[in-house]
Amino acid sequence: MLQDPINDVLNPLTLNEVDRLDCQGIVVENAVHSADFTWKDCDSVQFSNGKSTLPLRDFLTLLPAEVPAEASYDLAYGLAMDQDYKGAAAQFLKVALEGHNVAAALYGFASAIAQHGKNARSEKLAQFVAETDGFTDPRAYALAGYCAFSRKAAKPARVHLAKAARLARASQDYRPIQKFAQRVLLIQQFGSGEID
């Protein structure tokens, strides 16, 4: 049986992976510039990748009540690895709102909310990140595909997973992602509907 795919394959990017990623393609629009803002203050914030915009208001209900006092990608990653997904989601989002490693932080946010079964929103967010110029890590497409597969949306699942598998061929480091994407595609093709 395949272990938890989000934890085993679709983890947030490590700091080393973030450093290697050359992706400056996401802009935070209508950013809140107050040190003591609440999530409600972010209702008009949106992210733009030059191709589409992603309004933050669609995701605010998924967050814990409190905004973290300080944002740190390292802390967000640690919370995700410790399976504190609500804490990780809040940290990743605050990192993105501050304009630091926005694409990687949004991917981490998508991964964290997927852990709570918010597959449609996680898919939307992961697809937005995957379509950003310079984001070359196949995990975003793989996560979008897995979320579509989980909600039984066959066509988007196939499209995202095929893109993930193609991108993953670029590097040996992505071999687990390629195998994961291909396995889910095969499961979907043969109709078992379960990853085991």
Image (spheres, helix red, strand yellow):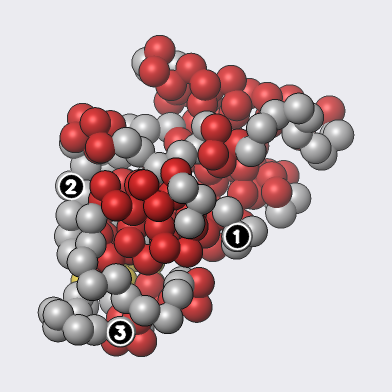
- Residue at 36%, 47% (x, y): give it: 78
Label 2 to label 3: alpha-carbon separation? 26 Å
Give the label on residue 24, or none: 2
According to the image, label 1 marks what residue?
116
Check the image and report above or below for 74 versus 162: below
Q: Are marks 1 and 3 in contact (CB under 8 Å)?
A: no
**Dot 3: within a 10 Å radius of its alpha carbon, few (fewer than 14), some, or many (20 or more) residues?**
some
**Dot 1: within a 10 Å radius of its alpha carbon, few (fewer than 14), some, or many (20 or more) residues?**
few
- Residue 69 position within the rendered picture, expressed as x and y whole percent measured from the top left: 23, 72
- Image quarter where the C terminus lies is top right
Label 2 to label 1: alpha-carbon separation? 28 Å
- Describe residue 87's horizontal placement relative to residue 3 as left or right: left
| Residue 103 can be seen in this image | no
Give the label on residue 38, or none: 3
- Describe residue 168's horizontal placement relative to residue 194 as left or right: left
Check the image and report above or below for 138 versus 92: above
- Residue 22 position within the rendered picture, expressed as x and y whole percent measured from the top left: 19, 36
Check the image and report above or below for 63 versus 114: below
> For the residue labelled by badge 2, is the local secondary structure a helix, a strand or a loop?
loop
> For the residue labelled by badge 1, is the local secondary structure a helix, a strand or a loop?
loop
- Residue at 22%, 49% (x, y): give it: 101
Q: Amino acid under label 1?
A: His
Pointer 2 or 3: first along the chain: 2
Pointer 2 or 1: first along the chain: 2
- Residue at 21%, 66% (x, y): give it: 70
- Residue 136 position within the rendered picture, expressed as x and y whole percent measured from the top left: 33, 32
- Residue 60 position within the rendered picture, expressed as x and y whole percent measured from the top left: 44, 76
- Describe residue 158's horizontal placement relative to residue 98 as left or right: right
- Residue at 47%, 64% (x, y): give it: 86
Q: Nearer the viewer, mark 2 or mark 3?
A: 3
- Describe residue 56's horizontal placement relative to residue 146 as left or right: left
